[in-house]
Image: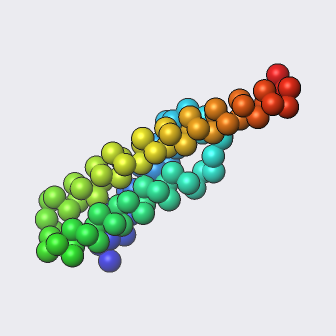
Amino acid sequence: MLILLPLVVAVVLGIAMHYATPDPHGRGVVLVPAISTAVAAVVWGTMTWMGFADTNFWIWLASVVVPIIVTYPISLWIAASRMSRDAAERARLGVV
């Protein structure tokens, strides 16, 4: 049950990262929080499998920090690729 706490934190951090990256309207609202939550779940599950107890400080820290480290660059990459593809498509169509 304690896995729900880091997952909720990951969702909140994902929403914050969604709006902190450029062009938040160029991708779905759920994409970045979903990536962040999936990363947090994998980190929590992996560290639990490795023998870390749910009362261990490191499992909580990793479940919060690793999703930020992984998700923010992914969201920047998604935003940049979407903006460049949109610009290329506007140029191809002749739209200003």
Left or right position of 64 against 26: left
Residue 92 locus on image (x, y percent)? 81, 31
Examine the rendering and report whether any part of residue 11 can be seen: no
Which residue is most to the front?
A: 92
Color theme of the render: rainbow
Left or right position of 22 against 8: right
Residue 12 lies, with reference to residue 48, above or below; the image says: above
Residue 59 locus on image (x, y percent)? 20, 62
At x 38% / y 60%, what residue is drawn?
39
At x 38% / y 63%, what residue is drawn?
7
Which residue is most to the right?
A: 94
- Counting the numbered discs, the total is 0
Residue in the foreground of this view, choosing between 39 and 93: 93
Residue 57 lies, with reference to residue 54, above or below; the image says: above
At x 22% / y 54%, what residue is drawn?
61
Examine the rendering and report whether any part of residue 78 can be seen: yes
Q: Quadrant of the N terminus?
A: bottom left
Left or right position of 2 against 93: left
Residue 87 locus on image (x, y percent)? 71, 29
At x 32% / y 71%, what residue is drawn?
3
Q: Quadrant of the C terminus?
A: top right
Residue 60 locus on image (x, y percent)? 23, 60
